[in-house]
Image (cartoon, helix red, strand yellow):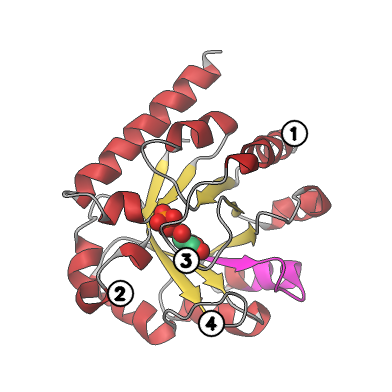
Amino acid sequence: MPAQISPSILAADFARLADEARAVDGADWLHVDVMDNHFVPNLTLGTPVVEALSRATGTPLDCHLMIEDPDRWAPQYVEAGAGSVTFHVEAAAAPVRLAREIRAKGARASMALKPGTPVEPYEDLLPELDMLLVMTVEPGFGGQAFLDIMLPKIRRTRQLIDKHGLEMWLQVDGGVSADTVERCAEAGADVFVAGSAVYGADDPAAAVRALRTQAEEAARRTSAG
Ligand SMILES: O=C(CO)[C@H](O)[C@H](O)COP(=O)(O)O
Ligand SMILES: [Fe+2]
């Protein structure tokens, strides 16, 4: 699958959200970080802002829910216009039921793992998901340094996906930049969230294209052995 880039609106100017969403036209997704001050020590936005963003941009919304009780709230993000909804397994009471509900409502269902959460216990759940998100920082804030120690988990997750012949995507989020995107792609990631690396650039749309090219070339080099 070609590499996909999902710029994180968390690193944008929240006073100019519509313009900032359009500044990354050409991106595959727009990553929307939802934080509730409980699952993580930060508070961002909820369904009204997701609805407004979905009216403001044609780019599909990739909602990353860092919230308690996603079983209750996640379906509302599909109704608000999200094309993909990611919940954290650490917060979900019934991840399979929730993934099925997200899919039944018409969005892609995705599950996230914090850095300390292993992937292996969830091997049997993978067919229920359209994407797995391996966090490469502790969730809660943008602009943190990429955690290299997550690379083995990305590799093991890729092996599990391939072992079961699944079509699902493998997303990485946190500290992804020109310096780290290639290592993620080599390890097997194919969807790359980038906040500061995109919105901190003079030309965010060009930064998206450059990250995609870097990721695709790294993946090609890896598969050529
Ligand atoms: O989920 C997140 C933080 O919890 C963000 O998506 C992530 O931090 C992106 O920002 P950056 O690329 O600046 O690290
Ligand atoms: Fe995120």
Q: Which mark is residue 36?
A: 4
**Inter-mark Cα distance, 2 to 1:** 37 Å
Query: Mark 2 is on which residue type?
Result: Leu
Query: Mark 3 is on which residue type?
Result: Phe
Q: Looking at the rendering, which quadrant does residue 61 occupy? A: bottom left
Q: Secondary structure at mark 2?
A: helix
Q: Residue 115, position in %: x, y?
A: 66, 54
Q: Secondary structure at mark 4?
A: loop
**Inter-mark Cα distance, 4 to 2:** 19 Å
Query: Mark 4 is on which residue type?
Result: Asp
Check whether the beta carbons of the residues at disc 3 and disc 2 lie within 8 A of each other.
no
61 shown above or below 131: below
Q: Residue 82, position in %: x, y?
A: 44, 70
Q: Earlier in the sequence, mark 4 or mark 1?
A: 4
Give the crowd class for mark 4: few <14, some 14-19, many >=20 residues within 10 Å.
Answer: some
Residue 12 visible in the picture: yes
Check whether the beta carbons of the residues at disc 4 and disc 2 lie within 8 A of each other.
no
Q: Earlier in the sequence, mark 2 or mark 1?
A: 2
Q: Which mark is residue 35?
A: none
Outermost residue toward the front? 145
Q: Residue at x 71, y 51 (%)?
A: 127
Q: Which residue is mark 2?
A: 53
Check whether the beta carbons of the residues at disc 4 and disc 1 lie within 8 A of each other.
no
Q: Secondary structure at mark 3?
A: loop
Q: Residue 93, position in %: x, y?
A: 76, 76
Which label lies toward us, 1 or 3? 3
Q: Earlier in the sequence, mark 4 or mark 3?
A: 4
Ligand 1 closer than 8 Å to label 3 CB? yes
Q: Earlier in the sequence, mark 3 or mark 2?
A: 2
Q: Earlier in the sequence, mark 4 or mark 2?
A: 4
**Inter-mark Cα distance, 4 to 3:** 12 Å
Q: Secondary structure at mark 1?
A: helix
